């Protein structure tokens, strides 16, 4: 389920959003790469949010 290129979201942006949500980036990435459903859904929502923002700029 994880895309081939996990760097679709710029790392600074992803880290900033995770920090704002009080989520440990290292643990998040570990869980994401192991296809934990919660982290996959969080990443999908962040991805959608970032893509919506970048389309309007």
Image: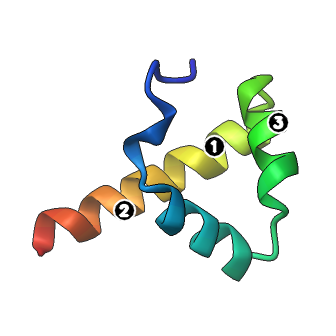
The mark closer to the camera, 3 or 1, is: 3
Query: Relative to 25, does residue 56 appear above or below in the rendering?
Result: below
Whole-angstrom CA distance, mark 3 to mark 1, is 14 Å
Q: Which quadrant of the view contains residue 35? A: top right
User: Colour mode?
Assistant: rainbow
Q: Which residue is mark 3?
A: 30
Quadrant in which the N terminus appears: top right
Whole-angstrom CA distance, mark 2 to mark 1, is 14 Å
Whichever of labels 2 and 3 marks the residue nearer the N terminus, that label is: 3
- Residue 31 in the image: x percent, y percent? 83, 36
Tell me the element at label 3. helix
Whole-angstrom CA distance, mark 2 to mark 3, is 21 Å
- Residue count near mark 1 (Cα–Cα under 10 Å), binned few <14, some 14–19, many ≥20: few
Q: Which residue is mark 1?
A: 41
Q: Which quadrant of the view contains residue 20? A: bottom right
Whichever of labels 2 and 1 marks the residue nearer the N terminus, that label is: 1
Query: Relative to 36, does residue 7 appear above or below in the rendering?
Result: below
Quadrant in which the C terminus appears: bottom left
Q: Which residue is mark 2?
A: 50
Instruction: Judge from the rendering whether residue 54 lies leftward or rightward of residue 37; answer left or right.
Output: left
What residue lies at 46% left-to-right and 18% top-to-bottom? 4
Give the residue furthest to the front.
12
């Amino acid at each position: 389920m994880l895309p081939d290129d996990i760097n679709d979201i710029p790392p600074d942006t992803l880290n900033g959003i995770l920090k704002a949500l009080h989520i440990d980036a290292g643990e998040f990435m570990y869980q994401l790469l192991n296809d934990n459903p919660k982290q996959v859904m969080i990443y999908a929502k962040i991805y959608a949010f970032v893509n919506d923002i970048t389309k309007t700029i």
